[in-house]
Amino acid sequence: MSSRRARRITALVSTIGLCAATGVAAGATPVQAAPEAAGQDVAATVFFPNPVQSTGDETLTDRKDTDYAALAPAYHQVTLTDLDGSGTLSGRYVRVRSETGTAVAVTGPSLPAYHRDADQFEQVMGYYWVTTAQHYLQSLGFGSALPAVNDRQIELRINQYGGDNSFFRDTKADITLGKGGVDDAEDGEVIVHEYGHSVQDSQVPGFGTNLQSGSIGEGFSDYLAVAVSEWAAGSGALGDPACVADWDSTSYTRTTPHCLRRLDGTKVYPADAVGEVHADGEIWSSALWAIRGALGDTRASRVIIDAQFGFTADTTFAAAAQTTVDTARRLYNAGVANTVRQAFTQRGLLP
Ligand SMILES: [Ca+2]
Ligand SMILES: [Ca+2]
Ligand SMILES: [Ca+2]
Ligand SMILES: [Zn+2]
């Protein structure tokens, strides 16, 4: 996902089979347990959304995928929901495939406490954060008061693509997460960023065919990553919420706070546009962030996401901004629409 190609780092392949199911004695997992019935929940361990965000410790680094003491407070207990009962990490919204490790087996009420040096940890992260992102969309009313958004099972694949190069495969819903630097699936915001592209593709198949629409895709995906982080943690619970991918970015940023990108930049169009989708996406995401600041998460995200149904695959900043203003008027009122308009005009995205 990075706009910078971090120097290609040979990922340390997890020692699968010898993985540290920390705190769980070998053989402690019941071997005879039947797979969970469909819809049943399973306890698991994740980063929430990532170690730098949740601990505030900007000195944490990858250390070649080792699990070290300073990371201990970053592990959180969560519940995996919507599993399909197949005994694998397959559920209503995502099916996880790893090409770099043995698949997680769901054989009881809780998974082993996989830590980051186990490939299974990333598989769990992928399942949890995609499902959480879909629950966020549903909490906004998508699928009830508003049309469903990306209510389908996507595939999340973990593989060995080098560099920091997670990507969303064009015209497909699916996500591939790589292993460059910090393993991409160790940062919930990287996972949800990629899910943001899947969301847009579900709303407008093939969305993002040129520079401006592609920039909107990157800006929205950054916005969704942070919105889901904050929703999961509780609004206001995270320090520096405007920072995207606080953990993955420790591999390719030298200054603190470590951020892949930010949502609260001051770029305006066209003066600060450079012709690269991630960089120019910061103009779009800062408008979305300002709308969220003015309207609150629920109203802002309802407007921002519902508007995307009306975008064309090759939309422009101005057309997409105008559709978003019109959506605010339709869902709410002229005052809300004016607030949205101001966020876009202040950044040169609308006349
Ligand atoms: Ca890892
Ligand atoms: Ca990475
Ligand atoms: Ca963050
Ligand atoms: Zn992206």
Image (tube, helix red, strand yellow):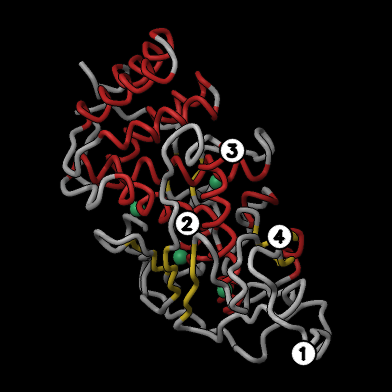
Residues at discs 4 and 2 in contact (Cβ within 8 Å): no
**Disc 3 secondary structure class:** loop
- How far is the residue under mark 4 from the one under mark 1? 21 Å
Rendering coords of residue 29 (x, y %): 79, 84
Q: Which residue is identified by label 1?
A: 31
Give the mark nearest the N terminus, 2 or 3.
Answer: 2
What kind of residue is marked 3?
Answer: Asp
Q: Which residue is identified by label 3?
A: 240
Point out the image quarter for the N terminus: bottom left
Q: In the visual, does 302 lie left or right of 113?
A: left
- How far is the residue under mark 2 from the one under mark 1? 33 Å
Residue 77 sits in quarter: bottom right
**Disc 1 secondary structure class:** loop
Give the mark nearest the N terminus, 4 or 1.
Answer: 1
Residue 222 sits in quarter: top left
Is disc 2's CB within 8 Å of ligand 2? Answer: yes
Give the mark nearest the N terminus, 3 or 4.
Answer: 4
Return the mark for residue 79. Answer: 4
**Disc 4 secondary structure class:** strand
- How far is the residue under mark 1 from the one under mark 3? 43 Å
Q: In front here: 285 or 157?
A: 157
Residue 313, above or below 65: above
Q: Check disc 1: other Cα within 10 Å, few if <14, some if 14-19, many if 20+.
A: few
What kind of residue is marked 2?
Answer: Val
Residues at discs 2 and 1 in contact (Cβ within 8 Å): no
Which residue does the image show at 72% across and 59% down from the upper left? Answer: 78
Is disc 3's CB within 8 Å of ligand 3? Answer: yes
Give the mark nearest the N terminus, 4 or 2.
Answer: 4
Q: Nearer the viewer, mark 1 or mark 3?
A: 1
Residues at discs 2 and 3 in contact (Cβ within 8 Å): no
Q: Which residue is identified by label 2?
A: 190
Which residue does the image show at 60% across and 77% down from the upper left? Answer: 120
